[in-house]
Amino acid sequence: MRPKVLVTRKIPDRGINILKGQCDVEICQQDGPISRKELLKKLKSKKYDAVLCLLTEKIDDELLDAAGSNLKIVANYAVGFDNIDLKACTKHGIIATNTPNVLNQAVAEHTIALMMSIARRIPEADRWTRKGNYKGWDPNGFIGTEFNGKILGIIGAGRIGTVVAKICNKGFNMKVLYHDVAKNSYIEQETNARFVDLNTILRESDFVSLHVPAIETTRHLISHKEFAMMKKTAYIINTSRGPVINEDALIHALENKTIAGAALDVFECEPKLVCDPNNYQIVSHLDNVVFTPHIASATIEARQSMSELAAKNILAVLNGEMPITQINTDLKINGIKKGIITDATSYFYANNGMVIKNLTELQTALEKMDDQAFNYHVNSMKNDFANWVKNTIKDQVASALLEKSRTRSQAVNAVKHRLKIMIAA
Ligand code: GLV
Ligand code: GLV
């Protein structure tokens, strides 16, 4: 019998076509997100092996209970996964996956588009021009801000934040400051970025761009105190998640011109523009803010690739293989019902999707990996490879060698050296 896959809403077809090769695919046909009630009803009525869901669907205990024991994977069609209760997935023995990397460029480009829109007042000028207001060239009309030589502050220097920094540094000659839980030597190499604390970013940046996930520690990361620290001439751009900014504080900052402006793709009470309906009139009339409706990844390239990656994750799990981008990496793979034999904790998931099980595979992976992927795992704050080798493979010699390797080629040589000693012994 072919496995059954439920897709909760129409998405670009590349992944759907891949799934149809091996599975019975049911695509929910409603306009807009599927209602919770409808989704629970569907999951109870039929035993699906996989669910391809969107960030509008909350994946929690209740939903997984409704889906029952046939379900093996929930593939999120998004990089962010604040809609998924990972603990619940692991408890139910269900693999959860997301779609990282394939949308980095799209989201970064949209971030730049928002920056330009707010700093050069494009939506405002467009509204004005449409009204027939343009009566002749004006030396003082719609004066904006240039990017050249300005300071960009990246909060959350992950895959997307790094691409934004590169475009701004190489394209606009901007200086880059960044803050994250760990240093990122790749962004430093590529853009001369400087690692600073959050307050320094807020005080010094002309443009602050947010690229953190929505987790407890990032909720209201930017609030009254933070806006007060920013330059009066500075702009904030948010293509991450709405709750990272305290909306009340934002409205206050925009109304009082504490900052020059904001450009937002995400909202605290999404899909509502404002949490408190009383604020709608105020916010919808502000000219120092630009909105887009959560479309940062909305390019044909990114959305087709997200579709493909979600489908490949599903097929991998249904075929008893490792998915490419699992997010509940604590799930022991032998906990799922079909096929996979090994304990997931003995694998290493590199951020470029490579799965590494032993030193030989680590060597191959390091040889194939690009420097960005390497630096994501090995930087001044951490050495994921050394830690994994020490704690999971329990090879203290290899771990010590890797600990000393600061570049990818040094790490390759360290592993080669260790393997050679092992063969000799
Ligand atoms: C969109 O917001 C995503 O997380 O992919
Ligand atoms: C998201 O994928 C990020 O790392 O910024």
Image (spheres, rainbow, N blue to C red):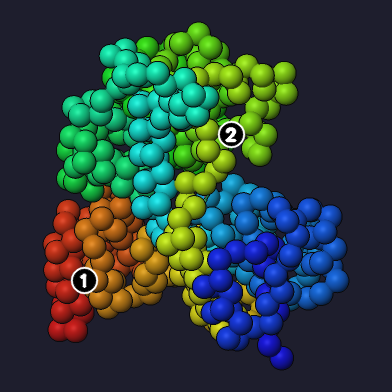
| Left or right, residue 349 beside residue 406 | right
| Structural distance between the alpha carbons of marks 2 and 1 | 42 Å
| Left or right, residue 20 beside residue 183 | right
The reply to whether dot 2 and dot 1 touch (C-beta < 8 Å) is no
Find disc 1 in the rendering and name its residue: 367
Question: Does residue 321 sit above or below 331 in this rendering?
Answer: below
Identify the residue at image location x=59%, y=47%.
Answer: 82
Residue 295 point in image, percent of width and height: 52, 46
Q: Report the quarter where the C terminus lies.
A: bottom left
Circle on res. 267: 2
Question: Does residue 423 sit above or below 71 in this rendering?
Answer: below
Q: Is residue 67 visible?
A: yes
Identify the residue at image location x=30%, y=22%.
Answer: 145
Q: Residue furthest bottom?
A: 1
| Left or right, residue 383 beside residue 85 | left
Identify the residue at image location x=53%, y=38%.
Answer: 292
Looking at the picture, which amino acid does disc 1 mark? Glu
Residue 22 point in image, percent of width and height: 60, 86
Residue 34 point in image, percent of width and height: 75, 56
Looking at the picture, which amino acid does disc 2 mark? Phe
Disc 2 packing (10 Å; few <14; some 14–19; many ≥20): many
